[in-house]
Image (cartoon, rainbow, N blue to C red):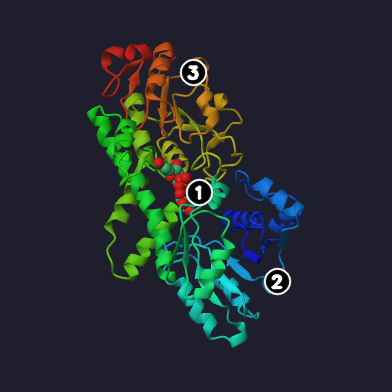
């Protein structure tokens, strides 16, 4: 089939590249001349695992083109995807200005025999509103149908998730649309779930907010477990063996970030307010997550007394590994809190060379970021941090306090390292370790001498 994807962000570009790989003829259109020039010259405006190879193959097989000229992109297409950004507005509502400007542009073309597919995450009712708007046009400007086809792509895993979805959700009103979408995705072995447009839109929000809620839930259980001497990884494993709960998204830590969970919770809260439907679980999920950065500061203050005048080394700035995205990353709040407490903040992240928090000193090496620090925070579980040489770190740190906000090291492994190198290792939902001994509260007085400032 001939497919046009309007919007070449990580959803649009991944969708275009993957559909080309499925054998379709794809045009990716965007208003950004720079983005299109980068793509047309073989470059990548975003990083996603496997995307570069997919695009190269699609280009070599002449299955994908890039353009800023939306006219021929629309005229050529059998299926027209809209994958433009719908960022949060200040009041939590989704900003649909880009979406509606594309719809108004598309409406000036003859859409007969074309299927319009909205892939952008939009407030429930938006796709119906687009359908109503297009129904007012002359008959030859109306598409076959307007479909809502939400994506469930995780940044860093988007290509994998496109080809291996748990389900393909299609919200549409006609049998013809169902058949076209079935044909479009027929190479992908996953169950189709057909429903009306509103249900498809709500599935996206409800799924994302549920995942965020699951994370906030395991985080408060971790805080409770920590006070009880439990190990949150054992608790999560024991919970996850129950198929009704499921093992994924039970990784306790410093909380979720990214461009989706925070945005989708705000959008669903706004929808609840508009529909006069109380959604208290969303408020709690958001409040718990917003408080996570404070928990890491409190842990540090238990051992340092104060952060004023201290030097904090932060490893990892992005909201998760395998991405350069720092949108809503917990590191933003943690660094601001440290600076507000009067600490100096030094940081390293493999993919970050500029950082929006004024006062944070960036280093190009993880050891330099830790040098002469009074505490080292691990905020993103980058693979390279797993190979940290603790014999070096223990000599570099002014005070040997490691706070692992992502539980990226096994507790037993760090107990051994803490014993060998006289470290204090704190994490989330697990007992603190002082010089190799597990303690259930801040370092006992009789061990403080071990950690006289270096
Ligand atoms: C999410 C959804 O997973 C995806 O389906 C949707 O399409 C877009 O939003 P994404 O935000 O890219 O994807 O990343 P994800 O892997 O879900 O992680 C989101 C955040 O939650 C990250 O900050 C991650 O560190 C955190 N997280 C994830 C946890 O803290 N604990 C977990 O167990 C899982």
- Up/down of 1 relative to 60, above or below: below
From the top left corner, tell me how far across and down residue 368 is, in percent: 57, 25
Q: Is label 1 in contact with label 2 (beta carbons under 8 Å)?
A: no
- Up/down of 81 relative to 325, above or below: below
From the top left corner, tell me how far across and down residue 432 is, in percent: 32, 24
| Residue 43 badge | none
Label 3 CB less than 8 angstroms from ligand 1: no
Query: Which quarter of the figure has residue 199?
Result: bottom left
Task: Give the CA separation, mark 2 to mark 3.
Answer: 59 Å
Q: Relative to 424, is 161 on the left or the right?
A: right
Q: Is label 2 in contact with label 3 (beta carbons under 8 Å)?
A: no
- Determine crowd level at label 3: few under 14, some 14-19, many 20+ residues with C-alpha closer than 10 A: some
Label 2 belongs to which residue?
76
Please tell me whether mark 1 sits on a helix, a strand or a loop: loop
Q: Relative to 105, is 260 on the left or the right?
A: left
Label 1 belongs to which residue?
154
- Quadrant assignment for the C terminus: top left
Task: Give the CA separation, mark 3 to mark 1.
Answer: 32 Å
Label 1 CB less than 8 angstroms from ligand 1: yes
Task: Give the CA separation, mark 1 to mark 2.
Answer: 30 Å
Closer to us: 307 or 106: 106
- Choose the circle earlier in sequence order: 2 or 3: 2
- Up/down of 193 relative to 288, above or below: below
From the top left corner, tell me how far across and down residue 206 is, in percent: 37, 58
| Residue 390 badge | 3
Q: Determine if residue 304 is in view.
A: yes
Please tell me whether mark 3 sits on a helix, a strand or a loop: helix
């Amino acid at each position: 089939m001939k497919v046009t994807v309007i919007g070449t962000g990580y959803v649009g570009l991944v969708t275009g590249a993957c559909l080309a790989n499925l054998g379709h003829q794809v045009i990716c259109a965007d208003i950004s001349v720079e983005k299109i020039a980068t793509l047309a010259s073989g470059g990548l405006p975003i990083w996603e695992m496997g995307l570069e190879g997919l695009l190269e193959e699609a280009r070599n097989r002449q299955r994908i083109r890039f353009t800023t000229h939306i006219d021929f992109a629309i005229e050529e297409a059998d299926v027209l995807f809209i994958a433009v950004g719908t960022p949060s507005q200040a009041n939590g509502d989704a900003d649909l200005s880009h979406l509606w400007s594309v719809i108004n542009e598309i409406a000036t073309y003859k859409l007969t025999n074309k299927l319009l597919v909205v892939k952008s995450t939009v407030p429930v009712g938006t796709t119906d509103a687009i359908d109503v708007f297009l129904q007012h046009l002359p008959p030859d400007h109306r598409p076959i149908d307007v479909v809502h086809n939400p994506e469930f792509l995780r940044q860093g895993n988007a290509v994998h998730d496109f080809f291996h979805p748990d389900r393909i959700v299609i919200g549409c009103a006609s049998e013809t649309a169902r058949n076209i979408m079935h044909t479009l995705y027929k190479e992908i072995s996953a169950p189709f779930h057909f429903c009306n447009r509103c249900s498809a839109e709500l599935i996206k929000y409800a799924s994302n907010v549920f995942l965020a809620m699951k994370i906030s839930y395991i985080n408060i259980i971790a805080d409770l477990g920590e006070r009880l001497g439990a190990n949150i990884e054992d608790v999560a494993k024991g919970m996850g063996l129950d198929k009704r709960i499921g093992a994924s998204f039970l990784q306790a830590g410093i909380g979720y970030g990214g461009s989706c969970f925070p945005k989708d919770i705000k959008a669903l809260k706004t929808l609840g307010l508009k529909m006069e439907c109380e959604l208290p679980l969303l408020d709690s999920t958001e409040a718990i997550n917003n408080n996570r950065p404070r928990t890491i500061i409190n842990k540090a203050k238990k051992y340092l007394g104060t952060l004023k005048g201290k030097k904090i080394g932060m490893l990892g700035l992005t909201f998760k590994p395998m991405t350069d995205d720092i949108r809503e990353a917990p590191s933003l709040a943690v660094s601001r809190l440290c600076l507000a407490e009067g600490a100096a903040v030094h940081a390293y992240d493999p993919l970050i060379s500029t950082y929006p928090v004024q006062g944070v000193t960036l280093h190009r090496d993880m050891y330099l970021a830790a040098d002469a620090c009074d505490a080292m925070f691990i905020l993103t579980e980058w693979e390279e941090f797993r190979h940290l040489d603790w014999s070096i770190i223990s000599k570099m740190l002014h005070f040997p306090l490691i706070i692992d906000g992502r539980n990226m090291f096994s507790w037993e492994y760090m107990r051994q390292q803490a014993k060998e190198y006289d470290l204090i290792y704190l994490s989330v939902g697990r007992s603190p370790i002082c010089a190799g001994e597990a303690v259930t509260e801040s370092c006992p007085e009789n061990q403080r001498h071990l950690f006289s400032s270096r």
